[in-house]
Image (cartoon, rainbow, N blue to C red):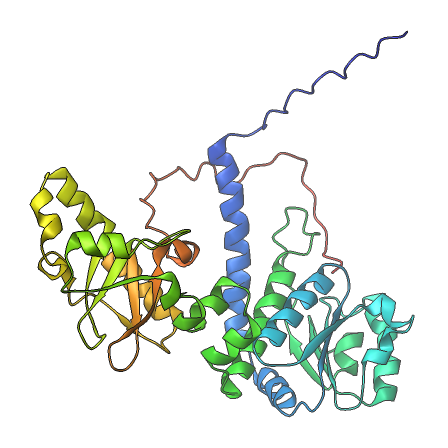
Amino acid sequence: MAMISAAPRRRPRELPITDNETLTLGRQILAAETRVLAGMIGKLDGSFAAAVRRLHGLQGNLIVTGMGKAGLIAQKLTATFASTGTRAHFLHPAEAFHGDLGRVQSGDVVLALSQSGETGEVVQLLPSLKEFGVPLIAITASARNTLGRAADVTIELGQLDEACWLGLAPSSSTTAMLAIGDALALVLSRVHGFQPEDFARFHPGGSLGRKLSHVEDHMRTLEDCRVARADQTVRQVLVDCTKPGRRTGAIMLTDSAGVLVGLFTDSDLAKLIERRNDTALDQPVRDLMVTHPQTVQQGSKLSVAIEILAERKISELPIVDQSGKPTGLIDVTDVVSLLPEPPVEDLPPISDGPATIRLFPDSAGESPS
């Protein structure tokens, strides 16, 4: 029986430049795209306002289209519009000729992206869009190219130098399209009076939506919490508050009227044990509890609770009703993924290295996007 030898492992290729040179190249690309965006600020004119007016009067859906890299930007913008209150759908220009044009209806507005304005699949759409009578907004280099001439409103990007060292890969141009599209979506959202509550409704499953939801949607209900009277002894409280499953790290203590007056935490119990203060176990828990604990009223945003947990560096946050009676508790372990990241220490500066690094022969070209 023939033996099959394992293929030799390939050794990782060594980077032909130093880390500092790598960082220099990356910084040059970021600087190039930053210059493009800075230039767009001064170029923004009445066409942007006209586009916002068109979209504000939208009766149907916003149909966003583009091909290649511009198409990927169009898909991202579709998601941004939809999530900020503007009904939007992506239309692939090539698929449009195989039935997807049926997505375009009376009352819609089309937003088309193409830097050159001559992209074949996008240009082929123009007669059909004109026949349907839907307004067309273009984000393109010039109002004089084919797409720009066909559009009712053209937001001109101008002739942009791509950040790609060959001047070919869409980079600065797609960055500019993304920024202009975001500006359209977010200005429109502001005009429509889009509120955090609306954002939460469209993002119920994400961390942003969770932060904008209410504390009662995420708290441990009273049935799952440990609650006791403050006039009981520590020993009685510990015995009576035994619960199966994953317990909270604190016992909520109430007065005779059921109003929250304090917390007794696992840390408080650990301190008693460490000090071997056995006699304290038969003292009223009110003598050892944390009085006037931080609380959040039911109906508050979860973001408020997250901020308190982070700023106060506490692990349990009781939720109370208007009369101060506990209705549940937020445990930090349930929302740890939503807590802000701790600040990162500043890294030591890295030399920019040489201003220009050439790995390949000089080459130049124009972006086909």
Q: Is residue 38 left or right of residue 325?
A: right
Give the x, y percent position of residue 168. 71, 52
Identity of the residue drawn at 71% across and 63% down: 70
Quadrant holding the C terminus: bottom right
Nearer-the-camera pick, 153 or 143: 153
From what the image shows, is residue 100 above or below residue 23?
Answer: below
Residue 221 visible: no
Residue 83 lies in quadrant: bottom right
Nearer-the-camera pick, 58 or 320: 320
Q: Is residue 111 left or right of residue 206?
A: right
Identity of the residue drawn at 70% across and 61% down: 72
From what the image shows, is residue 321 above or below residue 118?
Answer: below
Q: How many marks?
A: 0
Give the x, y percent position of residue 134. 78, 87
Q: Is residue 256 left or right of residue 21?
A: left
From what the image shows, is residue 268 above or below residue 358?
Answer: below
Identity of the residue drawn at 72% across and 55% down: 366
Give the x, y percent position of residue 368. 76, 58
Quadrant holding the N terminus: top right
Residue 73 lies in quadrant: bottom right
Nearer-the-camera pick, 355 or 121: 121
Give the x, y percent position of residue 364. 70, 48
